[in-house]
Image: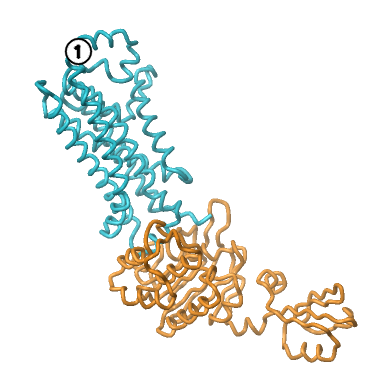
Chain colours: A cyan, B orange
C-alpha cells in the first residue's frame, strides 16, 4: 500500500462520492417521507396490492413484505438504494485500472517505483474508502429519516443494522466483479454501459428468480444473496447465500490480482 | 558492469511481432541511441525494460537486476519520458510534478524548479490546457526531477520547437557529464548522431546493427542531387555511388565513401545546382542494407 497513490485516488473520487451521497440522501428522504400516509392506509394498500399479478409483486419483492411496518417499508426503499450502490461500486470497479489505461496515464504510474501489487492494493483500498464514505452517509440518513418519519411505529434497530451492513458486501461484490471483468475484456472504452449492464442484469436476475425453473441462476446475484425483504422477514441473513456472495467476491479479487500482475499495459493507439 | 543487458529479448503480442531476439548492452555513462522507423519495436523495448509489458522469451537486466522480478527497485532510479504524453488532465502542472516526486525517497523540489525554469514551463496551468510541446516539457521535468541515474527517452523531441530541442539536448548532455546513462530512442537520424556515442538500429523488430556513431557516420550514405544541362548517367562512373537516377536534367544518387572524391568529381562538372543531404531513415534502410 502506498499512501500517495491512496490519497490521489481517494481525492479523485471525492466529487463522485458527493454526488452519489446526495442522490441517495434524496431517494431515502423522499421515499420514506410518505411512510406515514402509507402505513395509515395499509389496509387499503394491501387490498390494492392483492389485485396485482403475483409475478410482478415477486419481482419487486413486495409479496414478502408488509409495507405498513417501518422496516417493511424501508426494505422496499432499500431495493433502490442497493441498485444505486451497485452501480456506484460497479463504476469504481470497472474504472479502477481501465480509466488509467484508456487515458494513457498507466505508463506514468507503472514507471514509478511501485509494484503492481502495491498499486492495485492502494487503488482498491482507496475505492473501498470512497464506497465506505457513501455507505456512512446512507447509515446516518437512514437512521435520521426513520427517526423523523416513523411516528409511533416501532422497529427493530438490529434488523436495520443488518440491512445497512449488507451494503458493504453488495458493494464489495460489484467492485470486485467489475474489476475482474474489466481485466478480462480486451478494453473497456466507457465504464458506464458496463456497470449499468452488470447492475441491472443482476437486479433483473434476482427479480425474475424462479422464472428459470430448475436452473438456479439467481444464486449468482447479490440482490438475491442480500435480498432486503428476506433479511427483514427473517431478521437474519441467509447464511449460505451470504457465504456464496463473499466467495464470489474473493475469487474475483484473487483473479484480478493474478491477471493484473501478468498484464501487458496496452500502448497508445 | 553494464547498466543495461538485453539478452535475446523477444516479445509477441498474440501473433503480431513486437521484437525478436534483441540483444545489446549499454555501459555506464553512455548516451545510447536507439533508432528505427515507427513500428520497429523501439517503444516495445523500452516498455519491456520498464516492465510495463512482459517478455515472451529472453531476459533483460537493468543495474544488474532482472526486469521481471525486480522492477520496483530498478524503477526507483530511472527517469522515463514516454513518446506520447498523457497525464491526469484535470491536474495542474505543479500538482502532477509533486505527485510524481512523491514516489521517490528524496526531495525533488529544488531540481524541479530548476528544470521548469530551464524549460520555461508554467507550473500553474492545467494539463488539459497545454499544447503538445508544453506537455512534452512537463514530461521532461517529470522524468528528470528526481535525478535518476538512467534515463529512457522515447522520441523526446517530437513537439518541441528547435530552440527547446537545443535546450533539451544541452540538458541531456549535462546530465550525462554527471554520469547519467541515457537510452535515447528516435526515428530521426540527425539528432541521434548529434547526441549519441553508440547507436543500435532496429528494423522490423530485429537489431540490424549496433555500432559506434563514428563508424556509422563513416559508412553513412549521402543523398546527392545535381542539376545541370550536360549530365550523363552513364558517364557518372563513381565508385561508391549507387541508385543513380536521372530525371529532367537532375541526377540523383546515393554516395558512400570519402566525400572528397565526389566533390572533386563534381567540381569538374558544369552544374547549376547541388544539394548534399542526409538520407531519410527509410532511404537508409532501403539502401544501406542491400
Point out residue B251 in the picture as x, y percentages from the top left corner.
83, 77
Element assignment for label 1? loop
Is residue A263 visible from the viewing direction of this image? Answer: yes
The quarter holding residue B96 reads bottom left
Label 1 belongs to which residue? A41
Is residue A113 visible from the viewing direction of this image? Answer: no
Circle 1 chain = A
Q: In this view, does A148 lie to the left or right of B68?
A: left
Task: Work out whether A190 lies above or below B261.
Answer: above
Q: Is residue B238 left or right of residue A154?
A: right
Q: Report the residue at 47% width, 59% height from top.
A: B55
Task: Work out whether B253 lies above or below A230.
Answer: below
Of the pair B73 and B149, the residue shown nearer to us? B149
The quarter holding residue A188 reads top left
Point out residue B109 in the picture as x, y percentages from the top left corner.
31, 73
Point out residue B141 in the picture as x, y percentages from the top left corner.
41, 71
- The quadrant of the rendering that contains the N terminus of chain A is bottom left
Of the pair B7 and A245, the residue shown nearer to us? A245
Point out residue B256 in the picture as x, y percentages from the top left corner.
72, 82
Of the pair A114 and B19, the residue shown nearer to us? A114
Q: Report the residue at 31% width, 15% height from top.
A: A57
Amino acid at each position: 500500500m502506498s499512501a500517495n497513490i491512496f490519497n490521489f485516488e481517494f481525492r479523485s473520487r471525492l466529487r463522485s462520492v458527493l454526488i452519489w451521497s446526495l442522490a441517495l440522501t434524496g431517494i431515502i428522504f423522499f421515499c420514506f417521507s410518505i411512510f406515514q400516509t402509507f402505513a395509515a392506509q395499509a389496509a387499503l394498500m394491501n387490498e390494492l396490492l392483492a389485485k396485482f399479478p403475483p409475478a410482478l409483486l415477486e419481482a419487486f419483492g413486495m409479496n414478502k413484505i408488509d409495507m405498513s411496518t417501518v422496516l417493511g417499508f424501508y426494505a422496499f426503499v432499500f431495493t433502490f438504494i442497493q441498485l444505486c450502490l451497485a452501480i456506484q461500486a460497479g463504476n469504481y470497479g470497472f474504472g479502477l485500472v481501465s480509466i488509467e489505461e484508456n487515458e494513457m496515464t498507466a505508463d506514468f504510474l507503472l514507471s514509478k517505483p511501485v509494484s503492481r501489487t502495491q498499486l492495485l492494493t492502494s487503488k482498491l483500498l482507496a475505492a473501498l474508502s470512497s464506497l465506505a464514505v457513501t455507505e456512512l452517509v446512507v447509515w446516518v440518513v437512514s437512521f435520521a429519516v426513520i427517526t423523523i418519519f416513523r411516528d409511533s411505529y416501532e422497529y427493530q434497530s438490529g434488523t436495520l443494522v443488518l440491512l445497512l451492513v449488507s451494503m458493504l458486501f453488495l458493494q464489495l461484490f460489484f467492485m470486485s466483479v467489475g474489476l475482474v471483468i474489466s481485466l478480462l475484456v480486451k478494453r473497456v472504452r466507457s465504464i458506464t454501459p458496463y456497470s449499468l449492464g452488470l447492475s441491472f442484469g443482476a437486479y433483473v436476475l434476482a427479480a425474475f428468480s424462479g422464472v428459470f425453473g430448475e436452473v438456479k441462476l439467481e444464486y449468482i446475484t447479490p440482490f438475491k444473496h442480500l435480498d432486503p425483504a428476506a433479511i427483514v422477514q427473517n431478521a437474519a441473513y441467509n447464511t449460505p447465500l451470504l457465504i456464496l456472495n463473499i466467495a464470489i467476491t474473493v475469487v474475483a479479487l484473487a483473479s484480478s490480482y493474478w491477471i493484473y500482475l501478468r498484464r501487458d499495459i496496452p500502448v497508445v493507439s | 558492469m553494464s547498466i543495461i543487458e538485453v539478452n535475446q529479448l523477444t516479445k509477441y503480442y498474440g501473433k503480431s511481432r513486437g521484437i525478436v531476439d534483441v540483444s545489446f548492452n549499454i555501459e555506464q555513462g553512455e548516451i545510447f541511441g536507439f533508432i528505427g522507423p515507427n513500428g520497429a519495436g523501439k517503444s516495445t523495448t523500452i516498455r519491456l525494460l520498464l516492465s510495463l509489458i512482459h517478455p515472451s522469451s529472453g531476459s533483460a537486466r537493468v543495474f544488474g537486476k532482472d526486469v521481471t522480478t525486480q522492477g520496483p527497485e530498478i524503477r526507483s532510479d530511472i527517469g522515463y519520458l514516454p513518446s506520447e504524453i498523457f497525464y491526469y488532465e484535470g491536474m495542474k502542472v505543479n500538482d502532477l510534478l509533486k505527485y510524481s516526486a512523491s514516489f521517490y525517497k528524496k526531495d525533488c523540489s529544488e531540481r524541479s524548479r530548476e528544470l521548469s525554469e530551464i524549460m520555461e514551463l508554467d507550473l500553474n496551468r492545467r494539463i488539459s490546457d497545454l499544447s503538445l510541446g508544453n506537455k512534452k516539457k512537463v514530461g521532461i521535468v517529470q522524468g528528470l526531477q528526481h535525478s535518476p541515474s538512467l534515463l529512457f527517452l522515447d522520441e523526446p523531441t517530437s513537439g518541441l520547437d528547435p530552440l527547446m530541442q537545443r535546450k533539451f539536448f544541452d540538458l541531456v548532455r549535462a546530465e550525462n557529464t554527471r554520469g547519467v546513462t541515457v537510452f535515447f530512442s528516435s526515428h530521426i537520424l540527425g539528432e541521434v548522431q548529434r547526441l549519441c556515442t553508440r547507436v543500435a538500429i532496429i528494423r522490423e523488430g530485429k537489431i540490424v546493427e549496433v555500432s559506434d556513431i563514428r563508424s556509422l557516420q563513416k559508412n553513412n550514405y549521402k543523398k546527392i542531387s545535381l542539376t545541370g544541362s550536360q549530365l550523363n548517367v552513364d558517364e557518372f562512373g563513381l565508385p561508391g555511388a549507387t541508385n543513380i537516377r536521372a530525371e529532367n536534367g537532375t541526377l540523383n544518387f546515393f554516395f558512400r565513401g570519402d566525400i572528397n572524391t565526389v566533390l572533386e568529381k563534381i567540381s569538374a562538372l558544369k552544374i547549376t545546382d547541388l544539394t548534399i543531404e542526409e538520407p531519410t531513415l527509410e532511404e537508409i534502410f532501403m539502401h544501406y542494407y542491400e
